[in-house]
Amino acid sequence: MDAERVIAAAQAVETPVATVDVTAMESNLAAMQARANARGLALRPHAKTHKSAFVARRQLEHGATGLTAATLTEAEVFAAAGAGDLLIAFPPVGEMKLRRLAALAERVGRLAVSTDSVEVAAALPEQVEVLWEVDSGHHRVGTAPGEATVAGVTALVAAIGMERFRGLLTFPGHAYAVADRAELARVAQAEQQVMLETAAQLRAAGIAVRELSVGSTPTASWTQAGPTEMRPGSYVYGDAQQVVLGAMTVEECALGVVATVVSTPASDRAVIDAGSKALAADARLSLLRGYGIAAGHQDLVLERMSEEHGMLVATGGRTGLRIGDRLLVIPAHCCTTVNLHPAVLMVEAGRAWWDPVAARGWQAIAAGTPGPPGVVDGATRLGG
Ligand SMILES: Cc1ncc(COP(=O)(O)O)c(C=O)c1O
């Protein structure tokens, strides 16, 4: 990212402000698409990272076959932006969500959901296909590879029919907890291996597996064909986590929060106006000893945050910062940082514009995206 250009473009707005260097973002979109194409894999980016109709469209224009969403609101916003092939990689539970899902299924050409439960799958509208989630080591949703998955999918197929079973899905989230690149490579390779072996077992049992959906940003360098599609999400913006994992460089990071120094209580400490309400607090990076990277200030550590305050500490003894100075912080986690902001300032050569983080929810509901009827009325009234 071009931190100077972004800070200059943000001069006209108040801080803290989330910004995206569009040139860096475009280059990330092109690079991941090229990687998927070169390996013969479909790219289905996880669009929860940006929650933006504009960025969703750019991913599709670059060649993504479809998008992944985590929430119904995201899926609704991306469908309205033109996505005709959506995967909701989260089990939709409860009648209100199932009603929204049925309405969404009427609007998109292809819709699938991932789950590890026959109970969840059996309640889905019949136009919705199912990907069975396998636990490749993250220990979140998912049955164990091998026998447990074969048993689950056999029961699934008996309940919803073979045609609606699309295939297997896994997310290697444990890649974020590795000690080094060698361990990261092992996680990525093991992810592929358990998926291929389990698919072979299913096929031997007479069950057709049309899709093997895998992947994440940190493991993307190792994802090969065998699986049919990859679903990285964070790659679009990048963040300090990806830098620490060696998956992206600081230059490749596109998202930053521009903040202003509001206090310099000690020569080695400056306080910025970006705390945990502007920068994600769900990832504190031990290697960085903090919550993000202050671009161009290698000697500064974002050591602590309260809600509105971010405490920058100088490892060299003096911050060199003055009240009113602005700097750009690459957050530890881009997905949760974006979710804190109503809009992101998109910056490219010669222009900047606001891109709403439309799929956060409130905006989507306020803009009339179909939601549970009572909630829309109540929310409108509450908002005056
Ligand atoms: C199911 C699923 N797929 C894909 C992704 C994308 O992962 P990343 O942001 O590491 O690229 C995520 C992220 O949490 C996920 O939960």
Image: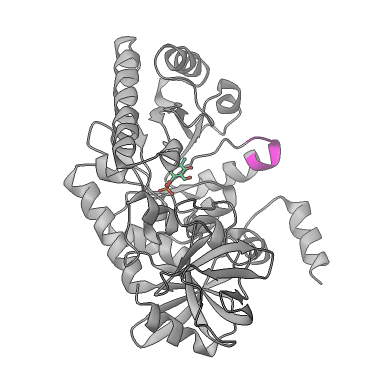
Q: Can residue 208 be seen in this view?
A: no
Residue 95, magenta (yes or no): yes
Q: Give x and y (percent) for residue 364.
A: 62, 62
Viewer-nearest residue: 24 or 86: 24
Q: Give x and y (percent) for residue 10.
A: 49, 84
Q: What quarter of the picture does the C terminus occupy?
A: bottom right
- Magenta highlight range: 93-97
Viewer-nearest residue: 327 or 209: 327
Question: In this rendering, is residue 130 above or below 20?
Answer: above
Viewer-nearest residue: 342 or 173: 173
Q: What quarter of the picture does the N terminus occupy?
A: bottom left
Q: Is residue 162 left or right of residue 304?
A: left
Which corner quadrant of the image does residue 167 belong to? top left
- Residue shown at the point (40%, 39%) measured from the top left: 178
Dominant secondary structure of the residues highlighted in magenta in the image:
helix
- Residue shown at the point (77%, 61%) measured from the top left: 379
